[in-house]
Every structure is written in C-alpha cells, then in structure tokens.
Image (spheres, coloured by chain):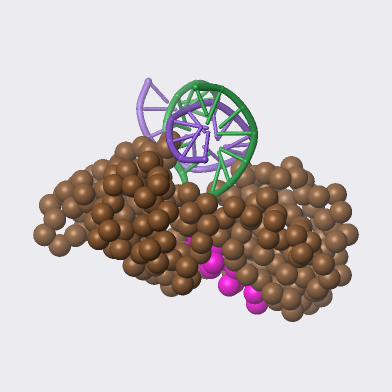
Chain colours: A brown, B purple, C green
Amino acid sequence: MPELPEVETVCRGLRGFLEHHTLTDVVVRRRDLRIPIPSDFEARLRGRTVQQLSRRAKYILGFLDGDDVLIAHLGMSGRLFGYRAGDPKRPTEPAKHDHVWLRTEEDTLLCYTDPRRFGLLTLCPKNKLAEHPLLKDLGIEPLSAELTPRFLSDALSRKQVPIKVALLDQAVIVGIGNIYASEILFRAHISPLRPASSLTPTERAALCPSIVAILQRAIDAGGSTLRDYVQADGELGSFQDLFAVYDREGTPCQRRACRGTIQRIVQAARATYFCPSCQH
DNA sequence: CGTACACCCTGGCCGC
DNA sequence: TGCGGCCAGGGTGTAC
C-alpha cells in the first residue's frame, strides 16, 4: 500500500491517538509478519508512554519513554487504525487480519491490520536504532535539504539500471515507491527506460523539483487511496484523482499540446506507466 | 561489487 | 458458482 506520502499521512494521523499517551494493553494475535514480532514485545510495550511519532523512509517510529523505539512498516497491505472510546466504527472483535491491538490509558484502540503480512512491527533499543538492519542502509530523505541536484548526479551517475528502477532503490533516496516513481518521471519529462547514468545534468536537475513536488502534493492530498487504503482516522486520501500516468494505460496524455497515449510496461517485474510522446 | 529474479502472502478481479 | 491465472502501493535472499 504505502509509499512515503501514505506513511507520512498515517504517521500524522496517529499522533493524536498516541503521542503522550500510555499503552495500557497489548494483544498480539499473529507474530509471523515479515519479521516475527519478538516474544517480549508485549512486556516491553505495556506501560510505556509514546513520546514522539516520526517517519523514516517508509517506517513509522514510535519513541517510547524508557529504552525502546517501536518500528512499524506497512508493507503492501498494512494499515493502522485508531478508534476513540465511543466511536461507532470501533470494532469489538478483531477482524481476520488484525494482528495487533493496542490500547491507551484514555481507551483509544489502535488496530494493526495486514492481510499479506509483508509489514512488520518490532522494537529496537534507542541506542541501536542507527545500526538496525532495517534502517542502517537507507538513503536520503527526499523532502529534506539532503536532496540536491549534486547528490542526485553523484548517485545516479554510477547506476546502470533504468532511472525508474533507480528511483525505487531505498539505498539512494527513500520513500519513492511504484506509483510515485512513474508520476515523478512524467513530471520531469524523462523516459523511465533511460539508464540512470545517461541522464544529462539538466535532466538530473529537473528530477529534484519533480520528486519534491509530487511527494509534497501527494502528502497534501492525504496520500493515494487504491483499493481500500484509508488513513489512520478512516478518511480517504485523494491523490489518485491527480495521477497523470499511474494506472492510466490507454488514456490520452494530459500534457498540453501532447497527443500521446499512456503506456504500461514492466520493469524489474513491476508496472511502469509513461507517455512515450513527451517523456524522452 | 551491481544487477536480475524468485519469493514471501492474501485477496480481488477477469475470463473461461 | 467455481477455478485458474494474473495483478497489487514493498523488501529480501540468492545466483550470477
């Protein structure tokens, strides 16, 4: 499900439920997620107060009082829902794929749901976070000052893979997933088929503002709602209405004065959408 | 080292 | 209605 804009949206939505609140109850129904939930997970969480929620790449990090950080990843199909006491939508029984239920001292219920179980929930001591295997090789945050034309030039000049595949590489820039990679390249007028190292300095420079603009606009829209993705409070994201190319195979290119038709191709076993007429 | 590919898992949809 | 095949927003282990 989630790329950076969706994870950022979920993280922001969860703050009102979790930040400065204490976990009073932890129930794990399935431990065999992508990484097994540790056996001492419940004991280490119970009674802890969430001091701060933040996002790193596509991970949500919950900094607790005490030694630990809660690490959450939503994989392809993971969701996190918060329900206040008295919310009519609040479930009384776990749904089929509700793997973890958390409660806070004010009786907020937090449900972690993930049918495909590509996501994960785990804990890491704060002083080992930087060296955690899931986090230690992550690249730069695209919505930070680290993203510069200079950085992109250096990083892309050494890569032989197509630029679309390079944008998905979380060791270079984090947070870009399969939807936004196509949208970014459309905005930058760059063909997804171009080897990353073949981009001219001008094209590499054009990529930076496209990355920022697409991700920021998607965050502003509350992320994209495909199939049944919803935010932490159940609201729908709307960036899917602004897709220029993703999932639009066969439709006319929206670019002014372009008469092209959006094509779907497969790269690294994943769908890529682009306009062959105005992306070169 | 970088790259290519299979695989992890469940569910929805489409065609027969 | 049932079934097989394909697809899905992510990430990793393995083989070259």
Coordinates of residue A229 in the picture (x, y in percent): 52, 57
Residue drawn at point x = 46 percent, y = 64 percent: A142
Q: How many badges with numbers are in the image?
A: 0
Q: Verify whether residue A2 appears in magenta.
A: no
Residue A12, relative to residue C15: is it above or below?
below
Residue drawn at point x = 31 percent, y = 58 percent: A204
Residue A172 visible to an observer of this rendering? yes
Quarter-of-image position of residue A14: bottom right
As drawn, is A32 to the left or to the right of C1? Answer: right
Residue drawn at point x = 21 percent, y = 58 percent: A254
Coordinates of residue A188 in the picture (x, y in percent): 27, 59
Q: Nearer the viewer, residue A202 or A182?
A: A202
Residue A274 visible to an observer of this rendering? no
Coordinates of residue A87 in the picture (x, y in percent): 67, 72
Quarter-of-image position of residue A60: bottom right
Coordinates of residue A218 in the picture (x, y in percent): 42, 66
Residue drawn at point x = 38 percent, y = 41 percent: A161
Quarter-of-image position of residue A184: bottom left
Q: Main secondary structure of the magenta part?
A: helix
- Magenta span covers which residues? A4-16
Q: Nearer the viewer, residue A44 or A203?
A: A203
